[in-house]
Image (tube, rainbow, N blue to C red):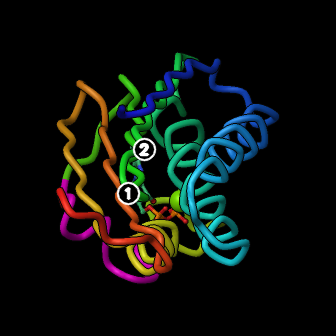
Amino acid sequence: MKNTLCLEIASLPENVGVARVTLAAFAALDSFSVAEIEEIKVAVSEAVTNAIVHGYRDSPGVVMLRAELEHSRLCIVVEDTGVGIEDIEQARKPAFSTDPERMGLGFVFMESFMDELEVVSAPGAGTRVRMTKTAARHEVREEE
Ligand SMILES: Nc1ncnc2c1ncn2[C@@H]1O[C@H](COP(=O)(O)OP(=O)(O)O)[C@@H](O)[C@H]1O
Ligand SMILES: [Mg+2]
């Protein structure tokens, strides 16, 4: 049976850690290694931080996290209904940031630490980041 998780957090910086440890605990139910769980934690932190500092930069809101775990494959969706992204291709480039105080590496980390990264966004509507990762030591089953 597929395991699922749903978490809604207010866009407060202190909730980044809550999301990170919750998703880490969820991933630990399957065969992810400690190193892989560290990577998942970084990816979740980056996506949630982006929703809070960029998405809800003008007004606070709710960050929604959904996760699915099946056959050692973890899928995480982080969604906000904030300001959205004008140019997704540009936003995903290394060292691009609309905030001169930031390094512009969040999407780069998400992309390198997860197997897949999909970003859907529209100005004024919000942003949805979908990431998947399969545990390296997962056992291939007959039905897969
Ligand atoms: N959830 C979001 N809502 C609005 N804009 C976003 C969101 N996530 C990312 N962005 C935009 O994409 C840019 C790049 O994001 P990222 O790679 O994490 O770098 P950084 O957060 O350091 O700026 C951000 O500067 C911001 O303009
Ligand atoms: Mg970022």
Eyeballing the image, is 7 above or below 121? Answer: above
The prevailing secondary structure element of the residues shown in magenta is: loop
Cα–Cα span, label 2 and label 1: 6 Å
Q: Amino acid at mark 2?
A: Leu
Towards the viewer: 123 or 63: 63
Q: Are marks 2 and 1 in contact (CB under 8 Å)?
A: yes
Q: Provide the residue designation for mark 2.
A: 69
Residue 77 lies left or right of residue 30; in this view the side is left
Q: Quadrant of residue 26?
A: top right
Q: Quadrant of residue 122?
A: top left
Q: Provide the residue designation for mark 1.
A: 73
Number of marks present in the image shown: 2
- Residue stretch rendered in magenta on the structure: 87-96
Q: Secondary structure at mark 2?
A: strand
Eyeballing the image, is 94 above or below 124? Answer: below
Locate residue 75, reporting x and y percent: 37, 48
Towards the viewer: 28 or 94: 28
Q: Secondary structure at mark 1?
A: strand
Look at 30% across and 39% down and name the residue there: 128
The image quadrant where one finds the C terminus is bottom left
In the image, farthest residue toward the front: 142
Q: Is residue 36 magenta?
A: no
Look at 59% across and 66% down and name the residue there: 32
Residue 21 lies left or right of residue 142; in this view the side is right
Name the quadrant where ligand 1 sits. Answer: bottom left
Category of crowding for the residue at label 1, using alpha-carbon neighbours closer than 10 angstroms: few (below 14), some (14–19), many (at least 20): some
